[in-house]
Amino acid sequence: MKSVGSHLASYLQGRKSGLRPARPFIQYVILLVAIILLYGWLFHVIMEWEGQEHSWFTGIYWTLTVMSTLGFGDITFTSDLGRVFSTAVLLTGIVLLLVILPFLFIRLVYAPWLEEQSRRRFKALRSVPKDTRDHVIICANDPIALGLVQRLRLAGVRSWVIEPDGELAGRMSDAGFPVLTGDIDAVETYAGARVETARLVLANAADTVNTNIVLTVRELSPTVPIAAIVEYEDSVDILELSGATYVFPLKQRLGEQLASRVSAGNARANVIGRFHHLLLAEFPVHNTPLQNKTVRETRLREATGVSIVGVWEHGRLLPAHPELQLSPLSVPVVVGTEEQIRGLDELLVIYDANPNPVLVIGGGKVGRAAARALKARGLAVHVVERNGALEPKVAGIPDKVFIGDAADREVLAAAGVEQAPSILLTTHDDAMNIYLTVYCRRLNPDARILTRVTHERNVEAIQRAGADFVLSYAALGVQTVFAAVQGRELVVLGEGVDLFYIPVPQGLAGQSLAQTGIGAKTGLNVIAVQADGKIEMHPQPGEPLREGSVLVALGSAQQRQAFEELFVKN
C-alpha cells in the first residue's frame, strides 16, 4: 500500500505518466464534492422550513451517511418534502459513490498504476546488477532450473533463470525467484545477463533451441563455459561443434545410473562416484554372510579397509550407525580406495547373487540406455515394451524383447519377473511406475526394484510402494550441472541425497563433532573432514574441528539448509 500511495502522490504532483489519466478522475472528485456541499446546503434549508436547527457540519454528515447508504437514522425529516429529498440524495449516492467512483478509480488510476509497475518491473528484470560476477545463467524455466537454483543458493552461487513471458517472470520475481525476462536466443538477453562474467551458462531447452543458444552466447563470449542438455544422442556432436563446453545426454545417463545400481550375477561392489582419490560404491548383502548382521559386526573396515557410510533401506539412505542391522534387502554404501574396493569385490565374488536375466520394463530412451549398460557388464537382460513400433529400436540390445502390456501377468511371467534379480522400471509415466512397483514386489519379493520418476512429488509414493532405488530426471540434471559448476566429478547417490562440501563455520571451529550435534540437529551424516588437502574418513567424534577445514557430508538439500540456518546464519 505504501507503494500505491507513493505512485498516487506522483500523479497529483504532475508526473506525465500519472497526471493525464488521473485528470478526469480528479474532475469527477471535484464534482462529487460540489454535489455533497449542495446537498448539505439544501439539508439546512429544508430543516429550517420544518423548524429544526443543526450545525453546518451536520448537513455534510447527513449527506454522506445517506449517499453511502449507511443511514444511521439519528437525523430525519418529518415532512414529505424532506423524505423526497432524502430519496434523491440516496439514489444520487448509489450512482456516484457505489457505481461510478469505483469504476473511474480502477479505470483511470489503479489500472494505469499497475501498468506502470509492470513496465518498470519488466525493465528491471531485463538485466542483472552491474557488479554481478561468477554467476550461473539458466536458459529455460523447467524442473531442473528450480532444483538447481536451490542447490546453487546453498553453495553461495548466484543464478538467474531466463523467462520470455514478462507476466510470468514478474510473478516469479515476486515469489523471490531469481529471473530475467527476454528471448532465450537474443543477444540482448545475454548482454543484460552479463554473460561475459558468468561462471556457467546452462542451455536446457530443446536440442534445436540449445544450438541457437550456444551460438548466440558465443557471439558475446568465446570463453564462458556452456553446459547443454540434449534429448537425443545424435545431438551431442552438433552441440559440441556449436561451441558447448559440456553436453549432457541426461536420459542416457539416467538409464546408465539405474543400471549401475543393479544387483545380478556374482555379488560385487558397484562404483557410483568418486571424490578426490576415494571411490563411493554400493553392494547388496542378499545371500551373503553380511545379511542380518549389524554394521559393527560386518568388520568390513578391518577386512578390506572400506568404510560403510550409509545404508539403502526401502529407497531411503540411512546413516551407518554401528548398531544398524542389515536386512537381506539392504544395500550398504561404502567409501575407499580403488585397491580397497577391489578387496571388497574379492570378498563378495564367491557368492552367487542371482544368475537370471535382469528385467527392464520400458524400451524408451532410458530403458535402452539401461539395457546397453547392463549388457556391457556381461549381464543377461530381458526388456518388456508395450509399443510394438519401438521393437526395431530395442531389438539387438537385450537378449530378448517381449512386446506387451507390463500390467499383464502373463507377459511379465514370460519375461521372467519371478526369477529376476533386479527389475528396472523406466516408463515415463509415474503412476504406471508406482503401479508396477507394487505389482512386481508382489510377484518377486526378493528382487531389487529400481525406478525412475518424472515428478519429485511422486518419490515418496513410489518408495512406499516398495522401490529400492528411485532417481528422477530433474534430480540427475541438478546434480550433473552442479558438479560442472563446482568443477568436481559427478556423484549420484540417489533421489533427495547429495554429497555436500561444507566449510566449517567460525562458530564451530574448536568444537568436536560430538559437541556440535550436527547429525542430531540437521540429519546430515558427516563422513569425512578435509583439511590441508587431505581427507580424513570417519573423523573421531571427540576431535576438534579446525577453522578452514571442510566437512564432507551426506544428506538432503533440506538438511543442508537446516545446517545453514543453525550454524551459519545464527
Image: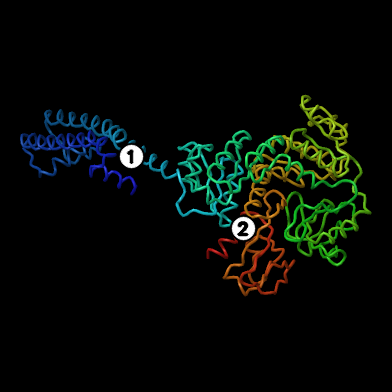
Horizontally, residue 153 falls left or right of residue 454, namely left
Label 1 close to label 2 by CB (< 8 Å) = no
Quadrant hosting residue 89:
top left
Residue 111, relative to residue 260: is it above or below? above
- Of 201 and 378, nearer the camera is 201
- Of 316 and 84, nearer the camera is 316
Three-letter code for the amino acid on which mark 1 is drawn: Trp
The image position of residue 33, as x and y in percent, is: 17, 37
Q: How many marks?
A: 2
Which of the marked residues, 1 or 2, is nearer the chain's N terminus?
Answer: 1
The circle on residue 113 is 1
- Of 317 and 382, nearer the camera is 382
Please name the residue shown 61% across and 54% down the image.
558
Three-letter code for the amino acid on which mark 2 is drawn: Arg
Task: Name the outermost residue toward the top.
Answer: 389
The residue identified by callout 2 is 560
